[in-house]
Amino acid sequence: MTSAHFDQLETRDPEQREIALFNMLPSVIQRAKELAPGWARHLADVDPREVTDRAALAKLPILRKSSLSTLQAEQLPFGGFATADPSAMARIFMSPGPIFEPEGFGADWWRSARALYAAGFRKGDIVHNTFSYHLTPGAWIMDAGARALGCTVIPAGPGNTEQQLEFIARLKPTAYVGVPDYLKILLDKAKEAGRNITSFQRAVVSGGALYPSLRQEYRERGIAVYQVYATADVGVIAYESSALEGMIVDEGVIVEIVQPGTGDPLPPGEVGEVVVTSFNRDYPMIRLATGDLSAVMEGISPCGRTNMRIKGWLGRADQTTKVKGMFVHPQQVVAVGKRYPELGRVRLVVTRSGEQDVMTLLAEAPTQDSALAARIAETLQEVTKLRGNVELKPFGSLPNDGKIIADERTYG
């Protein structure tokens, strides 16, 4: 009988998992500092022996994914963040940016087998992989995990739809991996052409939004679809299981949800930026800020997996905007709010009036005190060097969506 779980790691007591991860982390940081000059610079003031819990991890500096392109340009190809020479890697990829990513030697280097297993992929499945095999690593991430499970992989890539339909009709693959909407294109084109491609039973999708209506359409066509959250620099971060209640964090990473712009951890339920620490020996990532928004879900999944759950992708965290020719950053807005402990959520709204940019800081406050609003306005100008209005709002009135700056200007 096939196990419901990939291995025993998935059902560990959460406290035991936490102990195990943070027992390993100091040596990962030490190794990164010794072998990767980029990490040696970035973590120069960090004593790895002290990073033994989440509170200590939260004190480490953030490495922004958006800064990797610049850092790599200064020290090709990996910015000094790989622990081995490029010639010692199995493959080198280039994602838009450009950002270079390595793949080391070894089976399932990206750790995708666990996510595929949770979606029902098993030995004997024929997997139709429509992610691109050209330069970027998406297809290779899924390819490696499927083969590690004993699946047979069809390296289809995107496009050439007519040729793919013939392939599918003849070989009858049982599983699909790719972006969410390309599967619908294949199914609809097959119906138009009178081809039978009803062999698909399950699918794992990534790289785009899976809308509930599209998931339901696939379900009506007999295909169970699951999402996986992965990045080229980390590999798999989280994945869906049969419970379909949030995304379960992978066993090979530590995930934090932090306030955009500050890196401060947020409590469960609060929307913030996804920050990931991985244990990859070739290309470790220590507090990599992905730029994606999500939130921690309380409790454990009904499927029996006990790791942290997140709500999935909820938008982008990088909200830096230009007002009157000057950049305003989320961390500046957060800094204004921190000057006043009595405030709740804050949000800077940028609009246009009379052909001029207008900043309005919305702040949750216990009272509608005009004197408090005036003091906050002075602080806003001090921090951003720009004048802005302040509107005090009742607690709970600002949405919990992780947005610190809302640019509502329209350009016709």
Image (tube, rainbow, N blue to C red):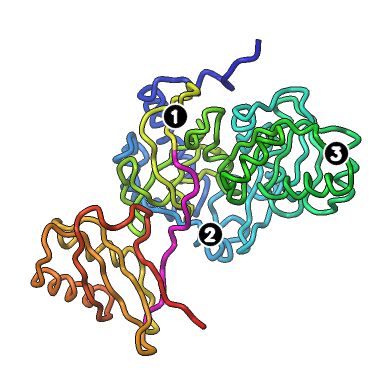
Decide if residue 376 is on the left or right side of residue 275. left
In the image, 179 versus 282, the foreground residue is 179
The answer for how far apart the CA atoms under marks 1 and 3 are is: 36 Å
In the image, 307 versus 276, the foreground residue is 307
Q: Which mark is residue 168?
A: 3
Q: Which mark is residue 307?
A: 1
| Sequence order check, earlier mark of 1 and 2 | 2
Can you name the residue that lies furthest to the top here? 1
| Sequence order check, earlier mark of 2 and 3 | 2
The answer for how far apart the CA atoms under marks 1 and 2 are is: 29 Å
Give the image location of residue 359, x and y in percent.
Answer: 30, 76
Magenta stretch contains residue 318 = yes
In the picture, the quarter occupied by the N terminus is top right
Badge 3 crowding class, 10 Å Cα cut-off, few under 14, some 14 to 19, many 20 or more, is: many
| Sequence order check, earlier mark of 1 and 3 | 3
The answer for how far apart the CA atoms under marks 2 and 3 are is: 39 Å
Q: Nearer the viewer, mark 1 or mark 2?
A: 1
**Element at badge 3?**
helix
**Can you identify the residue that label 2 sits on?**
68
Q: Based on the displayed image, in which of its 4 quarters is residue 236 positioned?
A: top right
Residue beneath the point at 80% across and 34% down: 198
Decide if residue 377 is on the left or right side of residue 60. left
Q: Of the residues shown, which amino acid type is indicated by label 2?
A: Leu
**Relative to 355, residue 266 above or below:** above
Q: Nearer the viewer, mark 1 or mark 3?
A: 3
Give the image location of residue 219, x and y in percent.
Answer: 65, 35
Q: Which mark is residue 116?
A: none
**Element at badge 2?**
helix
Q: Which residues are magenta?
A: 310-323
